[in-house]
Image: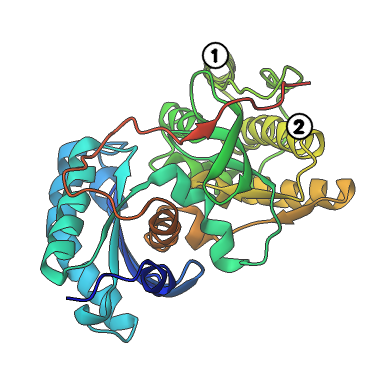
Amino acid sequence: MTAPDPAADAAAPAPAIVLGIETSFDETAAAVNSGPTDDLSSVVSSQVDLHARYGGVVPEIASRAHVELLTPVVAQAVVEAGLSNHDVEAVAATAGPGLIGALLVGVSAAKSLALVWDVPFVAVNHLEAHLYSSFLEEPDLDLPVVVLLVSGGHTLLVLMEEFGRYRLIGQTLDDAAGEAFDKVARFMDLGYPGGPIIDRLAMDGDPQAVAFPRPMRDQGYDFSFSGLKTAVVNHVRNNPGLDAADVAASFQEAVVDVLIHKARKAAETHRAKGLCLAGGVAANSSLRERMLDVCTAAGISGFLPSRAMCTDNAAMVAAAGWQRLQLDGPSPLDAGADPNLALPFLAGAEPAV
């Protein structure tokens, strides 16, 4: 019997065709990537209409919808990639953070497919996946970059030193920016989801109509949006005749001002080579416009993912899964889902100034 050749094993090509599965919240998604940056297909089935009548995502409804939708979504992603099941070399799925029931649907399906196809399974951090969304469309981005990750559940400033190495610069101390958008929209009876509705309404309003506060704008890198949300609620109650478009535009301007000010400061202080947006709120029109303006003024390279890459999708999950497979190898099949999963930050980030 011939002894294994370690050199031959080291030279073996890494898996390239990765199926990604995303079910962390209210989007059922699957995608196939060839390597870390080449997405061959990306299929997203939205549940917005299912939850709109309730004014927010209902976890039980989301989980049941994922069960019904995931199999056809995966099949469509493989077909659109021009491949067969036998071509898939690894299966990655979001393991957290998110709704526990929704996460378990995707993780269980991914493990089953990995077992049936005899390929590696990779558990992916949803936040880490968002960090890779820019690289899917701009693979030559130079590191380090500062990423402003803004979503319904998170608001983070992350220094991405290299793939797999992240330092936390700042985070929200209470409401995430997207959460504040949804709560303000719900109070104003605008509908769900709040972020896109306020974005559209704000286009017809005056962003200077109401001088809403800019919480913690000049205090380090952390964020706080709970007080801003309360300020909007109190102002509308005390001034019932205000134009809704002016309120939306003024509120949005306050959020964007704080986000952009801190992001620019972080990129300059940490000598980043670029500044990137990520997360669902990164689809906001005002945030995207201001981001490009401030990067141009500061001489910083800026990158905005397409709106399809801002919202939850599986292409970013497949990309993150490919990278994690190279860094850590396959995940064990007894790995569970964690609704509170945090990014693996390095210690010792530079102090805020």
Quadrant where the C terminus is found in the figure:
top right
Q: Is residue 324 above or below residue 267?
A: below
Label 1 CA crowd tier, 10 Å (few <14, some 14–19, many 20+): few
Disc 1 secondary structure class: helix
Amino acid type, label 1: Asn
Mark 1 — residue?
234
Number of numbered labels in the structure image: 2
Amino acid type, label 2: Gln
Instruction: Please tell me which residue is depicted at 76% across the width and 32% down the height of the picture.
Output: 208
Percent coordinates x, y for residue 290 in the rendering: 74, 46
Percent coordinates x, y for residue 352 in the rendering: 73, 21
Q: Are marks 1 and 2 in contact (CB under 8 Å)?
A: no
Residue 96 visible in the picture: yes
Q: Rounded to the nearest whole Å, what is the CA distance between mark 1 and mark 2?
A: 18 Å
User: Does residue 46 appear to the left or right of 153 in the view shown?
Assistant: left
In front of the other: 89 or 124: 89
Residue 42 visible in the picture: no
Mark 2 — residue?
208
Percent coordinates x, y for residue 152 in the rendering: 44, 37
Residue 115 figure quarter: bottom left
